[in-house]
Image (spheres, grey):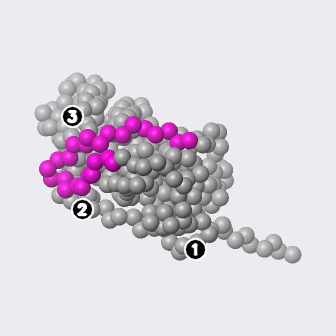
Amino acid sequence: MQIRNVPRSYDTLIHPGDTLDTPPPVSAPLRRARSSGDLQAMGLRARGTASSAPPALPAIGIAASHAAQKTQLSAAALETELHFTGTTGDSLSLRLTARLMVVAVRIAEHCAVAPPAGKPQAPMPEAWRCLEALASLRRKLNPAQLDLARQMLSLAAQASPHTPADKALLQDILKTVTQADGPGLGEYVAQRAYDGLCLGQLQLKADDEAEPPTRTFNSILPSLAASTYDYNPLGRTLLWEGACRLFAGPSAEQRREKLQAAVFSLPNVPAPGEQPLEHMSEFVLAIDGMGLDEAEPTSEPRAA
């Protein structure tokens, strides 16, 4: 099965405050089969090798940076302004417009992070925080005001330096969560994550189950990695949040970590001399090498 590659843009605009090392794309030699040594060099485990824990992902340095903190504060300021906003009229106040534009620019430009070559990606909690704030618009604004806000957000997203995959996902989410009668943010990203798994009519869990079973969870990890592979940190963050909602239940916390490893560990900008993953068999091998599978629960013996 061949995974469709989404065109990527390497001309990503970074603000002066964002100290990110984003090397340009490099030409790669002819493709060769990956050996177990190659997997180990990528931080993965060859099939059959024991592993006690998922591989460590890079520290989320961007979330602790000044720019990320400003993004979080901008989202909080927008929510505060919404609290004092009236719903009469068909226009937005100057203060609300200013707050809205700040958040739109932050998510359109600051969150357009190009991943370093050959390195795992990291989640962007500040991007999710911005979308949570924007999703609250429809609880306070009337339809005419929502239309104005949606137009502003759409223009900002369209002009952003996000890659095509991330930009399309962001635009779809902004359009959906600013509809007066549309699905909520969590519901929509969960549906997008589910669609990416290509499960058809297959249900993740039965009605009488508290959460999807272990076998189902283990089986979707390669598909989740493949369906999020062409995205950069913004897109992967949004789809990871969606996948976490698909697997809500008693094991949600532990599964969230494993889902994070599956979504963010595989670099879509290969290191010099490497090639991007293309076939589902490669994703299966890579996920197997991480040791992310849950152990099957032991069944209790039947009473005599």
Whether residue 237 is visible, yes or no, is: no
Residue at 32 percent across and 52 percent down: it is 115
Q: Going by the picture, which residue comes out furthest to the front? A: 30
**Front in this rendered view, residue 211 or 280:** 280
C-alpha separation, residue under disc 2 versus residue under disc 3: 34 Å
Q: Name the residue beneath numbered marker 2.
A: 64
C-alpha separation, residue under disc 1 versus residue under disc 3: 60 Å
Query: What residue type is disc 1 on?
Result: Ala
Residue at 20 percent across and 26 percent down: it is 91
| Residue 125 magenta-highlighted | no
Q: Name the residue beneath numbered marker 1.
A: 50
Q: Name the residue beneath numbered marker 3.
A: 86
Give the magenta part as a residue range: 2-26
How dense is the environment of label 3, judged by Cα within 10 Å: few (below 14), some, or many (20 and up)?
few
Q: Earlier in the sequence, mark 1 or mark 2?
A: 1
Query: What residue type is disc 3 on?
Result: Gly
Image quadrant occupied by the C terminus: bottom right
| Residue 12 magenta-highlighted | yes
Circle 1: element type: loop
Q: Earlier in the sequence, mark 2 or mark 3?
A: 2
**Image x and y of residue 265, in percent:** 43, 58
Residue at 60 percent across and 58 percent down: it is 218
Residue 142 vertical placement versus 49 (above, below): above
Please state the total of marks drawn on the protein image.
3
How dense is the environment of label 1, judged by Cα within 10 Å: few (below 14), some, or many (20 and up)?
few
Whether residue 163 is visible, yes or no, is: yes
